[in-house]
Amino acid sequence: MKTPLHINPLSPLLAQYPVLILDGALATELERRGCDLRDPLWSAKVLLENPESIYQVHLDYLQAGADCVITASYQATVEGFMQRRLPRETALELIQRSVRLAIEARDAFWRDPANRRDRPRPLIAASVGPYGAFLADGSEYRGDYGLTEIELMDFHRPRLAALLEAGPDLLACETLPCFTEAQALARLLAEFPDVYAWFSFSACDELHTCHGEPLADCAAWLDRIPQAVAIGVNCTAPRYIPTLITSIRGATAKPIVVYPNSGEIYNIEQRDWSGAATCATFSAEARGWYASGARLIGGCCRTTPEHIREIAVWRRQLVGAA
């Protein structure tokens, strides 16, 4: 394993900057560039077929102003790749490739002195998607797996080990639909004691996870986990975010992370999106999330580098006014 992480990687950055900017959707950008993601592996299949596209998306988000890029490992699991008749060793290598691509993009970006003005050296967050992402049946937005905490730990353990071997700055345990999975991942972190992670839930309304637990209760439990360095919400409609932030803020003093969808509505049966969402509107909403207490802000499904660029412009104004 590479050099362990002895300090919370978010602390020095949040001490210097009022808000850190995450990237936006990966799959949306890959599809815009011609990748066919109609597959149970979703964006993870691009690790196998066209990794250069993933590298370029990471680079584009960095150029747009992202302080942190999230790896293409959301749906990359040992079991998922092995269902494609790939050897276990190949599955682990592909999971690690997701981290290496992000690191390579970050390092290439940071080598240019012009990119170092008024911003921190970007972080790499290794995505740990929920068990339901592997199932590819929509249960990542329900959390009704029927698995125990121990079974979920056993599922996530090899992927966590592979991701950490590749050397990210921290983990992004994201789109978690239920409290049980958050507990499983938090307890699994104890097996990797020098590693830190943020925990981000998917929510069905202004107060509850997709499985129905009060988000405040989840945040209060995670508040006691030293390796949990931020708590929040992603892959959720923007209209719910302000109240969700308030709910989390009442349960923890840890930094709050939010990266919602663009505001468009997903039709599960037709598997497409409807509605309008503008970058300027999303940026204006991000200012409200910051005012409510969020300190890590980015985008999830249907957001683009343009959305992140608008937030970065605002952050520069915020820093300049300080």
Image (spheres, rainbow, N blue to C red):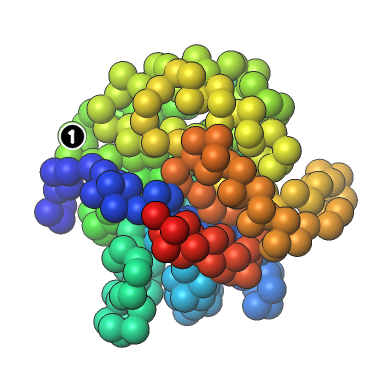
Which residue is depicted at the point 21% across and 37% down?
192
Tell me residue 287's x, y (percent).
Answer: 59, 49
Does residue 314 sit above or below 214 in this rendering? below
Residue at 54% from the left image edge and 40% from the top image edge: 291
Q: Position of residue 247 (x, y in %)?
A: 56, 22
- Residue at position x 68%, y 77% in the image: 34
- Residue 204 visible in the displayed image: yes
Dividing the image into 4 quarters, which one contains the C terminus? bottom left
Q: Is residue 134 above or below residue 273?
A: above
Residue furthest front as drawn: 321
Residue occupying image coordinates x 33% and y 32% = 228
**Along the viewing direction, whichever of 10 and 265 lies nearer the viewer:** 10
Return the x and y of residue 223 as percentages of the image width and height: 36, 22
Q: Secondary structure at mark 1?
A: loop
Indicate left or right for 128 with 192 as reference.
right
Residue 21 against residue 212 in the figure, above or below: below
Give residue 70's quadrant in the image. bottom left
Q: Camera-side residue: 262 or 171?
A: 262
Q: Which amino acid type corresponds to the residue marked 1 in the rendered image?
A: Pro
Q: Can the viewer see residue 98?
A: no
Q: How many marks?
A: 1
Residue 126 on image: x %, y %: 38, 52
Report whether 21 appears left or right of 225: right
Q: Depth check: 152 or 310 in front?
A: 310
Residue identified by numbered label 1: 193
Q: For the residue carrying disc 1, how many other residues have a C-alpha within 10 Å: few (<14), some (14-19), or many (20+)? A: few
